[in-house]
Amino acid sequence: MTNQYFIFPAGVPHSYRSDENDPWSIYWIHFSGNLASFFAEGAGRPLNVRPGLTSRITDRNSIFQEILLTLSYGYDIENLRYTSTQLAYYLGSMRFLHQFRKAQKEENRINSSDIVTVATHYMEEHIGTELSLAELTAYIGYSVSHFSAVFHKQTGQSPIEYFNRMKIARAQELLRTTELKVNQICSRLGFSDSFYFSRLFSKYTGMSPGNSANQPPMNRWLILQNKHDHASQNAAVSLYLCSQNSVAPVAAHDQHLSVASPNA
C-alpha cells in the first residue's frame, strides 16, 4: 500500500490499518465541493504514485504542509479560500499525474545517466523512510561496492551519510518553519529511535534539535545539493495518501475543505 492514494465518497463505511512488520503512514483530507466528484473519478481503489526519475513526491507533500500551515493561522475566509485553491492543486497533482511530473522545471529534471543524481533524487523522495543501501542500489542497478565507490568519489561521502545529512537539513527546516515537536519531526523523517535522531542531529549541526529552531540552516554544500484507523461518515469525499514510514502518524487535519469551479 506504500506510495498509493485512494478517494472514498461520503457515507461509505471503511477501515484500514498498517502492517505491524511493514508500517506506513497517511496524509488524509476530507473535502467537498462541486468538483469533488471530478477529482475522485477513478480513485475508488488504490492508485500508485511511485518514486522515479520524474516523480515529485516531495513537492506534493509540501503542498499538503502548506495547507496545514495556512489553516494553523486561523479559519478566516481568505485562509480558507487559499487552502481550497491549494487543495485543488494537490488533488490535481494526482488526478493529472503525468502532467504534474512533466511540468517540473527544466533544471530539476534528472539525467538518467548520472547515477549519483538519480540516487540523491531517490533519497529525497524517500526522506521519510529508513531507506537502506541495499534498496538504493537495487533501484540504481549497481552492486553495493561499485555504487558506494562511485558515490563517494563524486560527493566525498558514503550514500548513507549523505542521506542522513539530507534528513537533518530537512529537520532543521521543519524546526524553523513549523510548530512540529521534535518527536513529530523525528517520526516524519523515518527515525524510529528519537535518541539516535538527536545524536545524529548534534553530530551534524553542533547543537541539539531543541536549540536549533532559530538557527540558520545547514549549508547546502554539506549535503551536496500511525498507524491510524478512521471511518468518514460526514465528508463529501475522503482522500488518503499512503507513504512508507517506519513509525506512525504524520500530520493530518479534519478541517473540511472545498474544491469548486471558479464560477461556483
Image: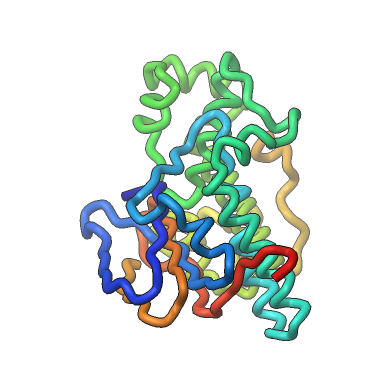
Query: Looking at the picture, does residue 9 appear above or below residue 225?
Result: below
Q: Which residue lies furthest to the front in this view?
A: 263
Please say whether residue 165 is visible from this viewpoint.
Answer: no
Q: Which x, y percent locates residue 11?
A: 34, 76
Location of residue 16 in the rendering, given as x and y in whole percent from the top left corner = 27, 65
Q: Quadrant of residue 217?
A: bottom right
- Asked which colour scheme the image uses, the reply is rainbow
Residue 61's place in the image compared with 209, above or below, is above
- Against 247, residue 110 (above or below) is above
Q: Position of residue 134 (x, y in %)?
A: 35, 30
Viewer-nearest residue: 35 or 126: 35
Observer-nearest of 68 and 190 = 68
In the image, what residue occupies the spot 50% across and 79% down? Answer: 254
The reply to whether residue 96 is in sight is yes
Q: In which quarter of the view is residue 223 placed?
A: top right
The quadrant holding residue 208 is bottom right
Looking at the picture, how far across and down is residue 46, in whole percent? 34, 50
Q: Which residue is drawn at 59% across and 62% down?
A: 64
Lateral position of residue 160 relative to residue 175, left or right: left
Where the C terminus falls, by quadrant? bottom right
Residue at left offset 69%, top offset 36%: 104
**Residue appearing at x 39%, y 60% in the figure:** 25
Q: How many marks?
A: 0
